Each structure stands twice: as C-alpha cells, then as structure tokens.
Image (cartoon, rainbow, N blue to C red):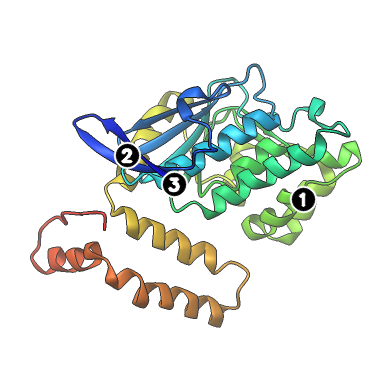
C-alpha cells in the first residue's frame, strides 16, 4: 500500500491506496465523485447498465477506494441510464470468461457487505437479475415508482445464488421462494411493502430526498456509523443470544474507545450539538 494526498475543497486528505487498483478518475463505466462526505458512484454503461467484468472491477475498486477515505461517510450507488441495472451481460457467459466474471461479481457484493461505509442504492428504473441483487445488498434503498425488481434467472434454467442468500433475510423464506421460483417482476410499491425498499418517493423529489438522507447520515460520526453497520450485519444469522453478545462486544470494547462516543455524551449533558472529530 502507498500513501497519496488528494486535495478536497480547502483541505488535504491522505488516502491509503493499493497500487494494483484502478484510479476512479480512469473508470470507464462508473462515474465516481466525492460530494459532501458521500462517494457518489453512478452506473453508466448505456443503455441497460449490463454488468461485464470490467465494470464490476470498477465497482469493486470504487467501493474499496471510498472505504479507505477518512472524508467519506457513505457511498451512494445510482444510475445515469433509464435502467438501474439489467444484470449480467450475457456476452460474459463464455467458457473462457465466466469464472473471472463470477469472481468479480461475487467480490462486488462482498465489498458492499464488508465496507465500513453505509451503502445507499438509488433505483429509478428496472433492477433485473444481478441489478436486483445489487439493490438488495444496499444498506438503504431509495426508489421511485419507475423502479421494478425481478429475479428472472429461473426462466433461463438457473437460479440467482446471491438473491437466494440475501432475500430470506430481507423478506422471509416464503416471499423469497416466490420471487425466485416465479421469476416475475414486482413493483416499487410492493418492494416497499416487502422491505426491499426503504423509501419510495416521486421522481421529482428523488434528488432532494437522496441529498437530505446523505446530509443526515453525514451529520453523524463516521466511526460510529461504521460500528453500527458492523453490529447489525455481524448479527445476521446468529441466535438472539449470540447476536446480543456480538453487539455488546462492539459497544463496550470498540465504541467506547472513540473520542466521538465520549463527545456525544458530553454534548448531551451540556445540552449542545456534538462536535464530531470522526475518531
């Protein structure tokens, strides 16, 4: 790893970078920018944002880059196209490409789960196959009525391995079986009812809603956001007793070592707004 200094507005931010990783400025299919403590990553492979290995590697590198930046508190994933993401490009399913493509595909989802930053997916169009899985793995999902979600893999003689893993946690096994076994699309309204979507807003209010949510999240301590995500996702699949033990271990042995956790308590007792130092 090597250090690189990047100027942001009126301050310098030191970022630890992997020399083998692509520079976000050189991305071809993912637009990457830092905006008000959020890393904005926009899928941009017209017309349907079909995922090939190169695009997946850019997503993975962008998530890793954002995760290492101390000035970034969250990641926003959206689309520059009318389709959020149409899934995997069928041209990648060749004998000499499929293993590399699937490795990149799975690495992106592990990257989303393992990054310290909350990931917000903004869906303003169809999310199909791998695109629906991409949205499902987001920590928060904001959608408009134009969104729809589908796992049509069963109609092609396969099943979606990632959706088959994450959907039971989100919607329960009965609904997950319905979504995977039928392969039929669901509307944004039903996705909201099922818990796949956190907020459903009119398209005209989408940008304002996303900006407001980003500002709210960015207003909190970065390390505390990280530990909250770690406690929630780290408890998935555990018994209630083990999940409680995991959460309390993070709370007592990690959270309380932070300057920000002490600052929050002082601010409460002194009836003032906390002054986060993000450490």
Callout 1 secondary element: helix
Mark 2 element type:
loop
| Residue drawn at (47%, 34%) of the image | 201
Q: Which residue is mark 3?
A: 67
Mark sitting earlier along the chain (1/3): 3
As drawn, which residue projects farthest toward the bottom?
Answer: 241
**Pair 1/3: label in front:** 3
In primary-sequence order, the first of circles 1 and 2 is 2
Quote the CA–CA distance across marks 1 and 3: 26 Å
Say few, some or many: other residues with alpha carbon within 10 Å of mark 3 (under 14 / 14 to 19 / 20 or more).
many
Mark whose residue sits in front, 3 or 2: 3
In this rendered view, identify the residue nearer to me: 253 or 158.
Answer: 253
Name the residue that disc number 1 marks.
Answer: 161
Q: Locate residue 47, reporting x and y percent.
A: 65, 17
In-image side of 35 versus 229 (left or right): left
Do the CB atoms of the residues marked 1 and 3 lie less than 8 Å apart? Answer: no
Image location (x, y in percent) of residue 87 = 71, 32
Query: What's the CA distance linking mark 1 and mark 2?
Result: 33 Å
Closer to the camera in the image, 182 or 81: 81
**Mark identifier at residue 44:** none
Q: Is residue 144 found left or right of 174 in the rendered image?
A: left
Q: Please, which residue is most extreme toward the top here?
A: 47
The residue that label 2 is drawn on is 37
Residue 10, image quadrant: top left
What secondary structure is marked by label 3? helix
Q: CA distance from mark 3 to mark 2?
A: 12 Å
Q: Is residue 263 above or below residue 65?
A: below
**Above/below status of 266 relative to 135:** below
Q: Residue at x 55, y 28 (%)?
A: 124
């Amino acid at each position: 790893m090597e250090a690189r200094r990047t100027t942001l507005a009126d301050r310098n931010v030191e970022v630890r970078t992997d020399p083998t990783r692509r520079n976000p400025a050189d991305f071809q299919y993912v637009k990457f920018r830092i905006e008000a403590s959020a890393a904005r990553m926009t899928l941009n492979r017209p017309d349907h944002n079909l995922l090939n290995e190169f695009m997946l590697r850019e997503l993975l590198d962008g998530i890793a880059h954002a995760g290492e930046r101390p000035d970034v508190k969250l990641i926003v994933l959206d689309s520059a196209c009318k389709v959020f993401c149409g899934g995997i490009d069928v041209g990648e399913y060749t004998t000499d490409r499929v293993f590399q493509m699937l490795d990149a595909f799975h690495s992106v989802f592990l990257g989303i789960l393992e990054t310290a930053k909350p990931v917000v997916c903004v869906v303003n169009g169809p999310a199909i196959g791998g695109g629906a899985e991409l949205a499902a793995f987001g920590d928060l999902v904001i959608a408009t009525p134009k969104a729809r979600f589908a796992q049509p893999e069963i109609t092609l003689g396969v099943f979606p391995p990632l959706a088959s893993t994450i959907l039971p946690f989100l919607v329960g096994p009965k609904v997950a079986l319905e979504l995977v076994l039928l392969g039929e699309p669901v509307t944004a309204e039903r996705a909201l009812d099922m818990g796949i979507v956190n907020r459903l807003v009119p398209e005209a209010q989408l940008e304002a809603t996303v900006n407001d949510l980003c500002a709210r999240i960015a207003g909190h301590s970065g390390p505390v956001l990280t530990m909250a995500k770690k406690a929630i996702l780290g408890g998935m699949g555990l018994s209630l007793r083990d999940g409680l033990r995991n959460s309390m271990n993070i709370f007592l042995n990690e959270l309380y070592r932070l300057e920000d956790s002490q600052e929050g308590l002082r601010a409460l007792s002194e009836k003032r707004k906390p002054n986060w130092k993000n450490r």
